[in-house]
Image (tube, grey):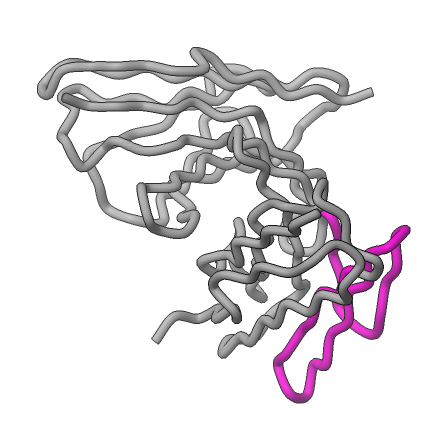
Amino acid sequence: SQTIHQWPATLVQPVGSPLSLECTVEGTSNPNLYWYRQAAGRGLQLLFYSVGIGQISSEVPQNLSASRPQDRQFILSSKKLLLSDSGFYLCAWSVDRGTDTQYFGPGTRLTVL
Amino acid sequence: KNEVEQSPQNLTAQEGEFITINCSYSVGISALHWLQQHPGGGIVSLFMLSSGKKKHGRLIATINIQEKHSSLHITASHPRDSAVYICAVSRGGADGLTFGKGTHLIIQP
């Protein structure tokens, strides 16, 4: 069966510090991978998606970047965190684009102080 | 105006009541998703539908493509149904989901 992992579960970071969140998927090959963010009091927003190794598409210009160094690994990074980067970050995967169920990871709660 | 609108934003009901949550969208879609988010933050996909109606246990989801509207119904509601229910759409030609702001449902015993 397929499993999606995210770590860390929670993170408190000072403004200006770097960030690295990791997501890995088990039990499937060549998944589509997604990073979403849920800011306090706001809905979920798509940040990045990837259809293959090294292929990253960004939906919203921001202080963050994403990388996919391996087929089932998706990393969200920042060189310098802003207060506005605080939120709940969710990784998800699907088999097909657009018309397939998405499976979400447990999420990382990031607080930038 | 958001591309995906949900109503109501908050709903409190008594155990056993029939619950309806509505979702309207203004863009072309390839599919509509209903998601459930529990207090810990984890999200579970309940339904994905592009036409008609789907049923799973006490949950029913319907979609009217012409009216760009979907509803999620919960029959015989129970306190364990308390959660945030989120409507999301897959847009034609795009990747990832576009989300509504969610409906916070509380079922009181």
Q: Position of residue B3 (x, y in %)?
A: 44, 71
User: How far across and how far down the image is residue B93, in percent?
Assistant: 55, 63
Stretch in magenta: B46-74
Principal secondary structure, stretch drawn in magenta: strand
Q: Residue at x 55, y 62 (%)?
A: B11
Q: Residue at x 18, y 37 (%)?
A: A84
Q: Which of B24 and A1 lies nearest the eye of the viewer?
A: B24
Q: Is A27 on the left-hand or right-hand side of A63?
A: right
Q: Quadrant of residue B66?
A: bottom right
Horizontal and vertical percent position of residue A5: 59, 16
Q: Residue furthest front?
A: B109
B5 in relation to A55, above or below? below
Q: Residue at x 71, y 39 (%)?
A: A95
Residue B78 percent coordinates (x, y):
76, 48
Q: Is residue B6 above or below residue B48?
A: below
Q: Quadrant of residue A56?
A: top left
Say which residue appears at 48% left-offset and 71% top-offset: B5
Q: Quadrant of residue A105?
A: top right
Figure label count? 0
